Amino acid sequence: MIRLKKYTVGSKIIQQGVIWIFFFVATTNVYAISSESFIKNPYIYHLPGITPETIETCSRLLQHNHEHYHIFFNSEHHFHNHATHYLLAALGLGASSHTLEHIYEQQKQVQQPIRPLHDNKDFDVNKCLGDENYYGNYLEFFKKELESEKYHGNVEDLIEYYLFNKDYLDLVFNGAYHPFIHLGYALEFQVKIMAVEGLAMAAVDRVNVKDVLKHLNYDQNKDGNKTALEIIELIIKDQRFDDKVFFNDEATKVDKLLERSGGPLIAEYAQIWKCDLDDLRRASVLVNTAVIRPKKALRLDFFLMHATTSGLFIDIFVHSLKKTENQFKFLKAKFAIDLLYYVARGRPKLNVNYLLNEYQSSKEHSYSDVQNPWLPLIDKCLTHRDTHVVKTIRALVYAEKFDSAQEKDKMSYLKIAQMVMDALFPADKKQWSHEGVGWEEYWKTVEDS
């Protein structure tokens, strides 16, 4: 059984509350975007500030990126081009055209140019998977697919078909969620080029998470009964993970964990999770932010952060899927990948009570003298050069909006956002942790607060 709380799957989509909504359609180029028509979707929430001018600016910059830059700015390590993510996250927070232009000028400085297409006789859509040299060929392939008679430009249908009929579900969660995030933006803003890029990125990114997902049983009659936090507590105590990944393993640690047969263990725990959208959204926030420790300087993990930034698209994604069994598969898979990164980062204890009840935000980010502290906080986050800061804050805004708990029982997402700002500002002195926040060896290197 899938627990979707506020909204019924398959119900008539209606506008609820004040939602800033818009739909991009083709102009002279089928992959250009404009604001000439609108889509009403209750699973999308944007702040005021979006105007025809900012939509045009963002559209133009997205198109420039699409035509000129590769999906990776570092081919050796598969570091992803984040320019589009930053632009759309900022647009969703109401950024001005000037801010969007400034963001893109910074982002494009590190990009590498898109490469010429390989000859079609050398390109096989199934055999070239995992080879980033064929990114341009996959772009052209998915452009043709999207505009074919089968899809007629329908982003949702294209994505659902490839995820669940062509095994791309395994691929979109590779690369620290980035193909999934890219497709999430495609669904949120109805940007065709984002759908094409997201599937092409999934096709050429490194394959690893299949070693987890292939062990999942997607039978809805065998849904579990444990919450995400209950499962995390069990994983912390499970000594079978002790020899699967170590502090001195390489940066992501995911590959080593899977090489040492961690995949089946992670799937075992994902199997007992009760498939609940609200629970997954909250866990995607806490697995990142509740790792902070009393009496220690704030540190947030770069890889666990992606559980939060990808969590913004859970609602949008699951409600775009037409088949209930696909919704179930998607939620189970997302939770399994969250667990994969949680284990790979050392199974950190989640100090939820400290985060929500004891941590005191700095005066700089508490904004106690203003009527709505969210507003100056959002404005300041848009000044950070790192797109992940903006994406994290936006994910917290979104989580507060869509958490179905009663107000008295709802987590303080504002307080969590203030802590994130404390951890990452000043921007020239603080940054994400890449070492692994679950290991005592790491915390011994962190100064006391």
Image (cartoon, grey):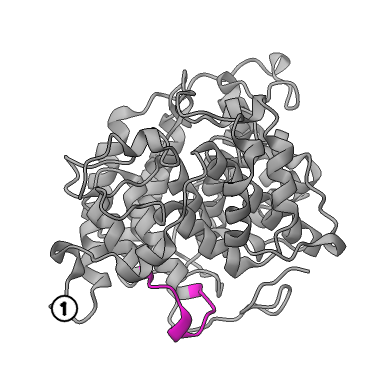
How many tags in the picture? Answer: 1
Above or below: residue 224 compared with residue 107: below
Callout 1: 10 Å neighbours few (<14), some, many (20+)? Answer: few
Q: Secondary structure at mark 1?
A: loop
Q: Position of residue 363 (x, y in %)?
A: 14, 66
Residue 295 drawn at (x, y percent): 25, 53
Q: Identify the magenta region.
A: 402-413
Q: Judge left or right: residue 212 versus residue 408.
A: right
Q: Is residue 166 above or below residue 261?
A: below
Q: Residue at x 27, y 41 (%)?
A: 431
Residue 434 shows in the view: no
Task: Name the one closer to the observer, 249 or 239.
Answer: 239
Q: In which quadrant will I find the N terminus? A: bottom right
Q: Is residue 88 part of the magenta span, yes or no?
A: no
Residue 407 lies in magenta, yes or no? yes
Place of residue 199 in the rendered image (x, y in percent of width and height, measured from the top left) = 62, 40
Q: Nearer the viewer, residue 36 or 161?
A: 161
**67 with respect to 43 (left or right):** left
Question: In the picture provided, is 61 more to the left or to the right than 372?
Answer: right
Name the residue rendered at 52%, 80% in the picture. 405
In this view, the residue in front, 116 or 251, is 251
In the image, taking residue 101 as reference, residue 151 lies left or right, namely: right
Q: Which residue was labeled with disc 1?
A: 370
- The foreground one among 262 and 317 is 262
* Position of residue 86 measured from the top left corner of the image (x, y, whole percent): 36, 48
Q: Answer whether residue 144 is visible to the viewer in this image.
A: yes
Q: Residue at 51% x, 57% y: name it.
A: 284
Which kind of residue does numbered mark 1 sit on?
Answer: Val
